[in-house]
Amino acid sequence: MSKNLRFDILRTALAIGIALFIALVIILFASKEPFTAISQLLIGPLGTVRHFGNVIEMTIPLVFTGLAVSIMFKASQFNLGAEGAFFFGAIGASIIAMKVALPIVVHPLVAILVGGLIGAVITGIPAVLKVKWGASELVSSLMLNYVALFLGLYLINYFFRDVNAGAMVSLPFLETANLLVLIPKTRIHFGIFIAAIMTVIAYYYLYKSKRGYEIIVTGENIKFAEYSGIKTGKVILMAQLIGGFIAGAGGATELLGMYTRFSWQALPGYGWDGVIVAILARNNPILVPIAAFFLAYLRIGADLMSRTTDVQNDVIAIIQGIMIVLIVATSFLSKYRHKMIFNEAKENLGETAKEGK
């Protein structure tokens, strides 16, 4: 493990620790039963198989969106279209799940692939606008999320709605389309393996391939990348297409693993949460599952706390805000980092001098 990675892990862990400490102090003074509230927040998700299963269920979509955002952010592209890609990818997968008859194993895989391709289109539009006309991918992707939302709802509610149901839901999926549940009494599904495979592929793509190296260099210094002969426009486009594909595949996986028909009437929010996961993971794919699990654990703990005590789960917003502020603050632990770099350079210089003798 490199010293930079160790420093990033230390910095993130310290930020999380400070945020949790402040939240616990707030709970201590604001609640009439603070110790019960703290217990529910910190160890409540471990209380039953069902509660811990809820943590894993929430972790799966967060891994997908965290990976998607990490790859786009690694190229220094602040495309926030993962939310729209996640939603519309689920729409595409729903149509395949409802209308296309395929074998039991092939069916969900085809639906997830279609969802991924649709997600790539969603994030690819801001990328093309950025490369061709210099439009801000931040603004265009934010606006496109709502285009994806209302276009998707139009398709479901006007063409694929179950008119016999007592709610605004789609027709039921074919039984062959749903992902298998792995653990009884939970909804932990086969998507956990797809998320794990996607994590490994994303890590090796970024850190072990030429294209991944081009993404990293372009993100760190686009002028240097251009001078080195890297086609930065192509890299910018590719990073956002890959991110959209992962987000769209995540939406499809979430839908086929957790639902038997499409029932969302609003953006699910996993794309926005993916930004938090990516920040916690420092845009490193291998750390994304850990960050996703941590955020899911906090969310489930906060939900249990709000249902059993007088503390509302808004306390999680405080924790998230403090963590993000500390992690993105460049001066946080900067003196320690400078000292670490100085000591490393001093050690290397001493070794070089010994070899010279």
Image (cartoon, rainbow, N blue to C red):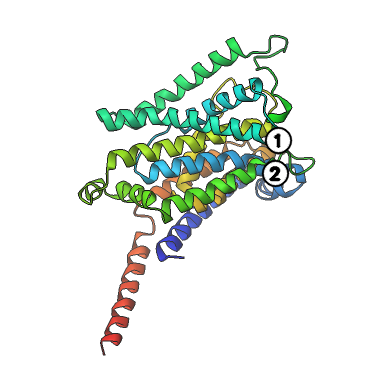
Front residue of this view, candidates 299 and 74? 74
- What residue type is disc 1 on? Arg
Q: Position of residue 217 (x, y in %)?
A: 31, 51
Q: Residue at x 33, y 68 (%)?
A: 341
Q: Position of residue 56 (x, y in %)?
A: 66, 44
Q: Residue at x 45, y 63 (%)?
A: 6
Image-quadrant location for residue 312: top right
Residue bearing the label numbered 2: 33
Q: Residues within 10 Å of mark 1 (few under 14, many from 20)?
A: few
Above or below, 264 relative to 72: above
Above or below, 178 relative to 47: above
Front residue of this view, candidates 275 and 187? 187
Above or below, 84 relative to 310: above
Q: Residues within 10 Å of mark 2 (few under 14, many from 20)?
A: some
Residue bearing the label numbered 1: 307
Q: Position of residue 242 (x, y in %)?
A: 44, 39
